[in-house]
């Protein structure tokens, strides 16, 4: 049975499987990697406004055969209000610029 090495990254640490893991085929290894990505997110969240997670799979030769990333970004009500105010200010700056001279 083919062997694969799975590496996970949760922004705080990178972990690589100590021994290659046996899977019947690449799809089974990548499915397992996706499950690991979901489990990392479940374990680490909620944890502030930002988190990045990643997973990769290498075959027996060391060739990367799969990579997935999950980027989490959250905004509080204050963040959303601030963004809205900034967007409104940008709109005013654009519309209140110099008036073009008539032809």
Image (tube, rainbow, N blue to C red):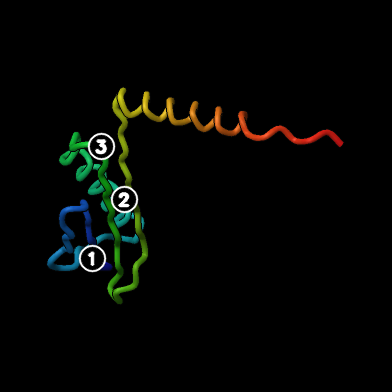
To which residue does mark 1 refer?
5
| Tag 2 secondary structure | helix
Place residue 63 in its image quadrant: bottom left
Kind of element beneath mark 1: strand
Q: Earlier in the sequence, mark 2 or mark 3?
A: 2
Closer-to-camera residue (24/5)? 5
Front residue (pair 17, 89): 89
Q: Which of marks 2 and 3 is in front?
A: 3
Quadrant location of the C terminus in the rendered image: top right
Horizontal and vertical percent for residue 58?
30, 67
Mark 2, residue position: 31
Residue at the disc numbered 3: 49
Q: As drawn, which residue projects farthest toward the right?
A: 103
> Do the numbered discs 2 and 3 sit on residues whose CB atoms are within 8 Å?
no
Q: Residues within 10 Å of mark 2 (few under 14, many from 20)?
A: few
The quadrant of the picture occupied by the N terminus is bottom left
* Alpha carbon separation for disc pair 1 and 3: 31 Å
* Rendered view: 90 above or below 24: above
For label 3, count other residues whose C-alpha is less than 10 Å away and answer few (under 14), some (14-19) or many (20+): few
Above or below 90: residue 58: below
């Amino acid at each position: 049975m083919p062997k694969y090495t799975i590496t996970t990254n949760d922004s705080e640490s990178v972990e690589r499987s100590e021994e290659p893991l046996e899977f019947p085929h690449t799809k089974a290894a990548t499915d397992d990697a996706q499950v690991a990505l979901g489990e990392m997110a479940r374990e680490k969240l909620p944890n502030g406004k930002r988190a990045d997670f990643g997973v990769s799979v290498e075959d027996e030769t060391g060739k990367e055969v799969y990579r997935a990333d999950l980027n989490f970004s959250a905004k509080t009500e204050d963040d959303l209000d601030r963004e809205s105010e900034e967007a409104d200010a940008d709109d005013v700056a654009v519309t209140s610029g110099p008036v073009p001279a008539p032809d």
